[in-house]
Image (cartoon, rainbow, N blue to C red):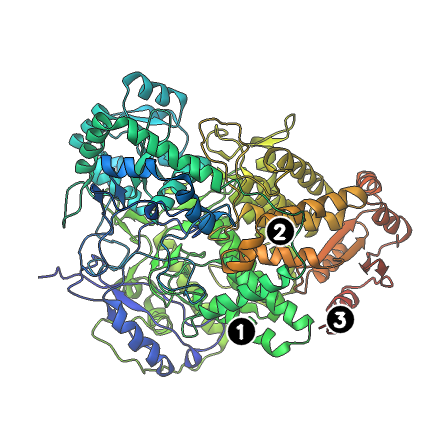
Amino acid sequence: MAKSVAPCLLLCFLIATVLPSSATGLVMSLQPHGDSSNPPTLLRFVERDQERAQHFAKRAGRLTKMPEKEEALNHRLPDLRKIAQPPVGYVQSTPSPTVKQAEPPHGTLYLFTPSHIMASLLLHNSMLKRPLRRLLSSHPTKLLSSPSTRPYPNTRSLISHRPFYASKLLAMADQHTSNPASQAHKHTNRLAAEHSPYLLQHAHNPVDWYPWSEEAFAEARKRDVPIFLSIGYSTCHWCHVMEVESFEDEGIAKLLNDWFVSIKVDREERPDVDKVYMIYVQALYGGGGWPLTVFLSPDLKPLMGGTYFPPEDKYGRPGFKTILRKVKEAWETKRDVLVKSGAFAIEQLSAALSTSASSEKLPDGVPKNALRLCAEQLSQSYDSKFGGFGSAPKFPRPVEVQLMLYYSKKLEETGKSGKANEALQKVLFTLQCMARGGIHDHVGGGFHRYSVDECWHVPHFEKMLYDQGQLANVYLDAFSITKDVFYALISRDILDYLRRDMIGPDGEIYSAEDADSAESEGATRKKEGAFYVWSSKEVEDILGEDATLFKNHYYIKPPEKKSFCDVIKISMPAEKYLDILGRSRRKLFEIRCSRPRPHLDDKVIVSWNGLAISAFARASKILKNEPEEIKFDFPVVGCDYIQVAERAASFIRRHLYNEQSRRLQRSFRNGPSKAPGFLDDYAFLISGLLDLYEFGGQTSWLVWAIELQDTQDELFLDREGGGYFNTPGEDPNVLLRVKEDHDGAEPSGNSVSVINLVRLASIVAGNRSKHYRRDAEHVLAVFETRLKDMAMAVPLMCCAADMLTVPARKQVVLVGQRTVEFENMLAAAHASYDTNKTVIHVDPTNSEDMQFWEEKNSNIFLMAKYHVAADKVVALVCQNFICSAPVVDPGSLEALLSQKSAPSA
């Protein structure tokens, strides 16, 4: 019989600034131990949400968390499974969808037999190259988790998912990790000297771990044994599970120590290493995720791999112990052919991933068609009931929102207002559903990683910095378009969460918060969501007389109360009602702060900080257009965000940038990491610095952005073939060099770089401007087939390609000293949504400003020189070599920028 427990309640926000009578949404009572024999009890719904409630009731008992998956995947990598017949020794550890299992989904591993290896090695070269050309020659990057069974473009989502299992609802809530504080350190390995939180989590395993290092490679060569490579990150739930089950097990540790050299890698610290072996696993097995489990030869060629494995054999599938024994046996008996097979796979992947452009630029019409195709493909996967694009589990993918907003703006500019509004409404409804769902932390602010259901209701509770920065930006865009403070408040909610919980003493912004935490101080078990969920009694005890209103607002009811139709009407001013909700959330937040917190990954990653810098900088001016009478309710507190952006950028410059070499390091924790900066670090930081300048920062940030662009071109640009590689190519131990394009949970470095180049080309003048545009055109030419055939995989690149076709970006030039009036004019310049606009500001009394513009763009210099007005900030709007008459007040500038151009065909 299931254990009787008090129901835990996940707060699901139903209304923003309206009274309960107009609220919509749902909340579910969750069994804290995820007992599948007692499915979750649905709480109360308003009448018009009955259909949603009934739909959710059908699914509630079978939803669970999916393992951490690589979603930035590319279906055009070679599917090496199709190269030869399935091997005799093939081991499939992913449960069949037709078999119901109570265990979490496992990874995939091929164990090669002689017949399979020889067959693959003896294949005629042309037989191998046909599928490679067909699947990948047009596209040099990532693959889908597993190919869709339906022909594209009818697929619902770019992300395909493993089957759900009914035994766990709340993200494997009864899986637990040990509390390190409660254990004596019986073992200590080399990871204890590392800085990465993920590596430090494994520093006291009995496994004799090495970090990724020459020492480890030399040890494998000396002992003549294969390498066991385990890749994950500190907030990865299934990484925690595999650690507890296998890496803390003395018996398994002995097998690893006797038969292998074991290496642990933090994928966030070394994305270059992760990418090599993730691509291999994806290409060979059709999917991937974390923890990533790969066996290598001493010279780092992959031999076989998979993802998560349980320790013991179950349901006819091998456990980790069995896999270790089979790998050892294969290494001892068929080493030569095994190594040749791995080397052959890397050779083919390297050739496939080295695609070059066949021309210097995209053919005419491709950008426009790609933008339309991507919007159409996203619309086909749009969920009109619950918002979002695709089915459960639902990830917030901000690049999709960016694409639809951009496309809506283009339709409006061409006189197609009906279609423009249709695209816009899909985005707005999606953002509303996300903000009102359980994926949003209503008590503390910010968003969790993803929702396991289509209603955005039950989250995987991990919080990632890259999500927060991107989501804050798209909510800012929605506010710019609609002027609805709902979106402004959600963007503040995210940014205030970061300010409160994720920023270090010197302004650095941390990476992530884990999903798992102890239920109480001293507890030896951790559960996912323990920090975030509440029982009904807790709410009553904490809130007292306000509990009834709060519970009605969030539809918190005992599990036996199942009515879908109750509506409560309350007679009180809306302001008082919202004040009570804010006061109640603050009380819950204060109590929550006394609970054991989830693990904080306080690593500082340059690329993710770049995304957050952008959001803070943009918010500092866009949110000045909120109504003057706006009132903030906790967790929103409200502040000026520009200083947050500047402190984060300053931290990176001080600690992760070498002024002599002009190079970045990847990350910081107790000192810079050993890893260099990668393409994403440069591209995302440059984007953040451009926003920091355009939204009011000093010109020095723009100068640094230009310097970084020069270094990025030197390190990553393929000047002959076009496109940017993801790594500098200076480390011989990183076997693949990839040109990324997939815009997934994070945008691709190439997509962001093209937009950066377009923006820089509109800021500087002369040959440098032309140079930026030529590089952008050449980058896009590499991905021509991708834009034509699979635009949905590259939504931000579709926007970038269209931006490059705009004959002349609109330039807003502000001339004046930094006064309150300057701030107001800058807010007016950014009041309207327009991604094809550049804002330039010059202080004519600042000699460094004037010198910069005299060198980089003499036209801007002359504007600043001849439009000085005492105690005024002068604004000029220029396009196609024509400038408007100067204006000196914010209202006139807003009116000027809001004028619509004549519709074009």
**In this view, the mark in front (2 or 3):** 3
Given the image, on which type of amino acid does mark 3 rest?
A: Ser
Indicate left or right for 607 with 873 as reference: left
Given the image, on which type of amino acid does mark 2 rest?
A: Ala
Quadrant that contains the C terminus: bottom right
Given the image, on which type of amino acid does mark 1 rest?
A: Gln
* Residue bearing mark 3: 901
Residue 317 x/y as whole percent: 17, 46
Q: Earlier in the sequence, mark 1 or mark 3?
A: 1
* Residue bearing mark 1: 425
- Whole-angstrom CA distance, mark 2 to mark 3, is 28 Å
- Residue at position x 62%, y 37% from top? 712
Q: Is residue 486 above or below residue 845?
A: below
Marks 1 & 3, CB-CB < 8 Å contact: no
Marks 2 & 3, CB-CB < 8 Å contact: no
Q: Which label is found at residue 617? A: 2
Q: Residues within 10 Å of mark 3 (few under 14, many from 20)?
A: few
In the rendered image, is residue 269 in sight?
Answer: no
- Residue 330 figure quarter: top left
Q: Earlier in the sequence, mark 1 or mark 2?
A: 1
Residue 858 x/y as whole percent: 85, 45
Residue 242 x/y as whole percent: 25, 41
Quadrant that contains the N terminus: bottom left
- Whole-angstrom CA distance, mark 1 to mark 3, is 23 Å
- Residue at position x 67%, y 50% from top? 361
